[in-house]
Image (cartoon, rainbow, N blue to C red):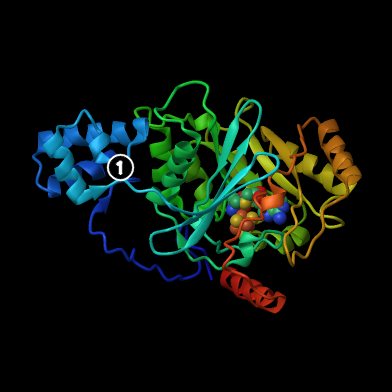
Amino acid sequence: MAIPGHIDPVPVPRPQVASDDARVDILGLSREAIRDALLEAGLDERQAKLRAKQLWHQMYNRGATDFDAMSDIAKPQRAWLAERFKVGRPNTVVQQVSTDGTRKWLLKTDDGHDFEMVFIPDADRGTLCVSSQVGCTLNCRFCHTGTMRLVRNLTPGEIVGQVMLARDALGEWPSQPEGRMLSNIVMMGMGEPLYNFDNVRDALKIVMDGDGIGLSRRRITLSTSGVVPMMEKAGAEIGVNLAVSLHAVTKEVRDEIVPLNRKYGIEELLQACADYPGANNARRITFEYVMLKDKNDSDEDARELVRLIKKYKLPAKVNLIPFNPWPGAPYECSSDERVNRFSDIVFEGGISAPIRRPRGRDIMAACGQLKSAAEKKSRAELDKLAEEKLAALG
Ligand code: SAH
Ligand code: SF4
């Protein structure tokens, strides 16, 4: 069966938000949608436009969630708004802090699904790793999220809500142009962002909007496992940095560890990278490469990686990710010596290949370790699920 564009390849239940709160949550709506909601609630055209502008500023520049705190709006108007609307946040179930300062949040949607986000502080930057889906339709063999079913796509409000919540926690309101703790965003949490294209695009548009959070597209990276038909559209309509989870250089190995490769092969994927709008030497494409012992980590693999990147003349760098283990994972991480050697070969080929230091492993917050705690499965169940997901890929 085909994966039709950004439509989910596997039919999934989409429960409606079960809430006894009839107010409309305006977080994640576009300016136009907020204006329309105000019109529908009875404001005239001029008022609706003005209020939408004020609300946008209050929500995304000031971080306000309470209409009463919106001092530029007249008091009776604030009460009127509060009766009909709200500014939501994802619900926090637990927050954990790693010994290295990494923070992980287990979050819950209003209809009761768990998902995760991670904040990784560094000396010169702070990166928020944002989820796009609850679970994932794909089943990369080394990824913990891949052992979950796709429960549902996150809405724009739930995606942008992660950024809002992190900034609440960091005390980063109002938005400042410089010196932010949350300086970068990576769409590398749970899920495949290009299978939830519209919602990810709409959320990132809000994050980049200059009248609100105002984070530059150069500080945002979208990671895909290789959904080729959506890559050009992503470049054109979102325009953020691209990271591609390559992880292998032969069909045999990539078919095994990134099963989407059976649908969109390596050469097709690299061609889509070459065609990605906006990629150049100043804005290189990142190839992520997870180091799996005796699977994809030979000298020959490293040389082939260099050859492929050169063949497609890609402005690229390679991020080598030591495999982060999780309970029941079928692989082991390559030795330090192997990872160093691999990195050296790629460097010698003229391509930057830093080794990513794992962060937050002690709280299962590192790459590929995210998975809702409620979703525990036996090995046999995992294998059955993997087969089902593969069958769906055709
Ligand atoms: N679905 C997207 C984004 C989320 S995964 C994608 O696959 O690109 C973010 C990154 O973590 C990807 O490069 C993914 O391959 C990598 N990853 C997954 N499991 C991992 C693990 N156990 N150890 C190290 N990296 C892992
Ligand atoms: Fe999904 Fe990415 Fe994990 Fe693959 S690596 S299963 S695409 S989240």
Kind of residue at badge 1: Ser
> Residue 371: percent from the left, percent from the top?
60, 60
Place of residue 49 in the rendered image (x, y in percent of width and height, measured from the top left): 17, 35
> Whole-percent x and y of residue 199?
41, 50
Using a 10 Å C-alpha cutoff, classify the residue at mark 1 as few (fewer than 14 neighbours), some (14 to 19) or many (20 or more).
Answer: some
> Count of labels shown?
1
Name the residue: 72% across, 40% down.
319
Q: Is residue 260 above or below residue 104?
A: below
In the figure, is residue 274 to the left or right of 28? right
Give residue 343's position: percent from left, percent from top. 83, 38
The residue that disc 1 covers is 30
Q: In this image, 66 relative to 37: left or right?
A: right
- Secondary structure of the residue carrying numbered label 1: loop
Tell me if residue 171 comes above or below residue 375 in the rendering. Answer: above
Q: Residue at x 46, y 41 (%)?
A: 163
The reply to whether residue 264 is in sight is no
For the N terminus, the image quarter is bottom right
